[in-house]
Amino acid sequence: MSRRIPGSERTREGLRDLIEGRLSSETGRSELVRLATRLIIEEGLEAEVRDTLGRDYYEHGQAAGQGYRNGAREGRLKTAEGFIGYSAPQVSGTAEPFRSELRGHLKGHSEALEDLAIEMLARGLSVRDIEDAFKDETGRLLLSRTAVSQLGERLWADYQDFATRDLGEFDIVYLFIDGIAERIRPGQRREPVLAAWGFTSAGAKVLLHLMAGSKEDAETVSAFFQDMRSRGLGDPLLVVSDGAPGIIKAIETCFPRSERQRCLAHRMRNLAAKVPEDVCRTSRPASLPPIRRHPGPSPATWRTAWWPITRLISRARSPASWTTSRPASPT
C-alpha cells in the first residue's frame, strides 16, 4: 500500500523533474511558472489546515471537536498561464464546518501568485513576501506567523537546492542564454531575469540557472556563467544567445572552447518586425496565403530551424575535440 503524501510534495517532485529534464514540456517557462505557483498554493493551504488542527500531516492526538484531515479535493485557479489545478486538503470533525479563507482569497490574486512563483525560482522568497501574498483586503494575515515562517523555510530550502546543486552530472551539449523581463514583485516594474537552459546529449531540457535583477553587461553575465562553472558546468558544444554585446563578450570569455550562435528565434522576430505588412502581402505569389504577423516562432519551428545547423556542427567535431583540445574561437 502506497503511503499518502501531501499534494505539495507531489508538485515539488514534478517541479524538480521539470528542472532536471525528466519531465518534458513544449512550453518550459509556462510550465515552470504553473508548477511553482501550484506549489505555493498547496503549501499555503496545508499551512492553513495545520493552523486549524494544531498539528502536522502525520501527527495524531486530536481532541474532541478539533477535527481531522479527510483527504483532498482538486481545485482550479484561472491565471495568465491558463488554469492551474491544485490539491486542496479537506477537514472534517470540527465543531464548526471548516471553510478555507485562503482558497477564496486566491481567486482574485492569481497575478500576484505568479509573480511570487517567479521570485521564488529567481532569488528565493522572504517571510515578508509570503505575508504580503496571504493578506486579505483589510491587511489581515490569513495564516499564523508560525505557519508563514515554516512555509518560508520550506520554500527557501527549495530555492537553495536549485541554486546550489551540482551541474557536473549534466552532459550539456547546447546552452541557451537569454534575458527576459519578469515582474518579480506585484505592482512594480518588470525586472530583467537571466535564464540558462541546457540540452543534454540524451535530449533532455534542463533549467540550469536563473538570476533576477541582472543586467546584460559583460561583467554581470560573466558572473552568471562563472557561478554555473563553479558548480561543475562543462564546455557545451554550442552556446546560443541574442545579439546583446555584453552576453556575447561573456560567452567568448567564459566558454572559449564552445561555438557561439545568434538565436534564430530572435533573428526571425527582428526580420518580421522590420518588414512592412504591405510588402509581406505584395511580395508573395498570389497562390500563397498572406503572411500573418506573429510575435515569434513556435517551439516546434525553432527546433526545426536550429537542429540541422547544430547537427552539422556536432558531426564535424568529435566530443574530445570540443571538450578538451579545441583552441579558442578567433571571434
Image (spheres, helix red, strand yellow):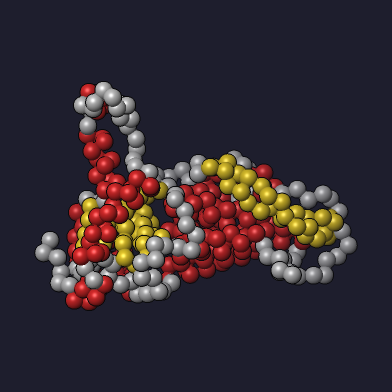
Q: Is residue 37 left or right of residue 234?
A: right
Number of numbered markers = 0
| Quadrant that contains the N terminus | bottom right
Can residue 230 be seen from the camera position used here? yes
Towards the viewer: 173 or 141 = 173
Going by the picture, which residue comes out furthest to the right?
64
Towards the viewer: 187 or 264 = 264
**Residue 234: x and y, percent?**
30, 72
Q: Residue at x 82, y 70 (%)?
A: 61
Q: Is residue 209 left or right of residue 271?
A: right
Q: Residue at x 34, y 37 (%)?
A: 295
Q: Residue at x 71, y 61 (%)?
A: 50
**Residue 142: x and y, percent?**
66, 51
Q: Residue at x 24, y 64 (%)?
A: 315
Towards the viewer: 108 or 74 = 74
Can residue 217 be seen from the camera position used here? no
**Residue 59: x and y, percent?**
76, 70
